[in-house]
Image: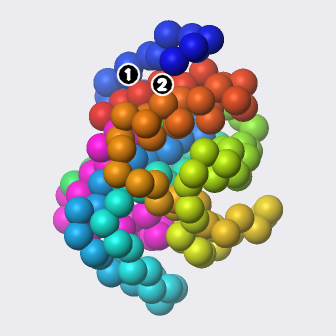
Amino acid sequence: MKNFHPIKLVKLQKIPSQPGIYTLLLHITMKIRIQSRNHSKFELPPALYVYGGSALGTTSSNLRHRIHRHFQTKPQKTLFWHIDFLLQGTGPPILCVFAKTQQPLECLLIQTLQTKGGRPVLGFGSSDCKVHCEGHLLSFPNNSDEICEKLLQAFQTLKLEPAITC
């Protein structure tokens, strides 16, 4: 990767308790069907998926809290967001790329990833989206090395310093 800052690898327990945005990389190996709490139904074929989220709060909705929630495997976790229902069927993400910011850049990040080949899953994770994104879950062809590079490039395109946890 040319012209990139060194990428920080951060242990899950060392994620900052600050506002920011993040992406989760998921690998779905067989067709999965999910239904969310508002009865939205999604059928996802095998592929690599990237979910984009925001964690712009200071307490229970900061980066540390939100990302820990997504890596949590407790069966009693309350299912709330679309991504909760998906992770219930797939298990924790492969990795998470995140960056500290107080700016609501989640939609710009998703749009940037779409220019890099991501195809939105219509309506997934974007029910409260103010810019009317098609979806905050994107599917990509099966090449995780390429996707990791695209994730890092997308964050850096937005002038953010990404870090990775897994």
Q: Is residue 105 above or below residue 74?
A: above
* Labelled pair 2, 1 in contact (Cβ < 8 Å): yes
Question: Which quadrant of the figure contains the C terminus?
Answer: top left
Q: Is residue 126 left or right of residue 48?
A: right
* Residue at point 72%, 24% (across, down): 159
Which percent across, then down, holds residue 32? 29, 75
Q: Is residue 50 left or right of residue 33?
A: right
Q: Is residue 32 above or below residue 136?
A: below
Mark with earlier residue (2, 1): 1
Element under disc 1: loop
Element under disc 2: strand
Which percent across, then down, holds residue 24? 43, 47
Q: Is residue 35 above or below residue 93?
A: below
Which residue is the site of mark 1? 10
Structural distance between the alpha carbons of marks 2 and 1: 7 Å
User: Which label sits on residue 163?
Assistant: 2
* Residue at point 59%, 30% (across, down): 153
Question: Disc 1 marks which amino acid?
Answer: Val
Label 2 environment density (alpha carbons within 10 Å; few <14, some 14–19, many ≥20): many
Q: Depth check: give the residue in front, 87 or 146.
A: 146
Q: Is residue 47 left or right of residue 80?
A: left
Q: Is residue 136 left or right of residue 23?
A: right
Label 1 environment density (alpha carbons within 10 Å; few <14, some 14–19, many ≥20): some
Colouring mode (rainbow / by chain / secondary structure / one colour): rainbow
In magenta stretch: residue 81: yes
Magenta part of the chain: 74-96
Q: Depth check: give the residue in front, 156 or 96.
A: 156
Q: Depth check: give the residue in front, 21 or 111.
A: 111
Question: Disc 2 marks which amino acid?
Answer: Ala
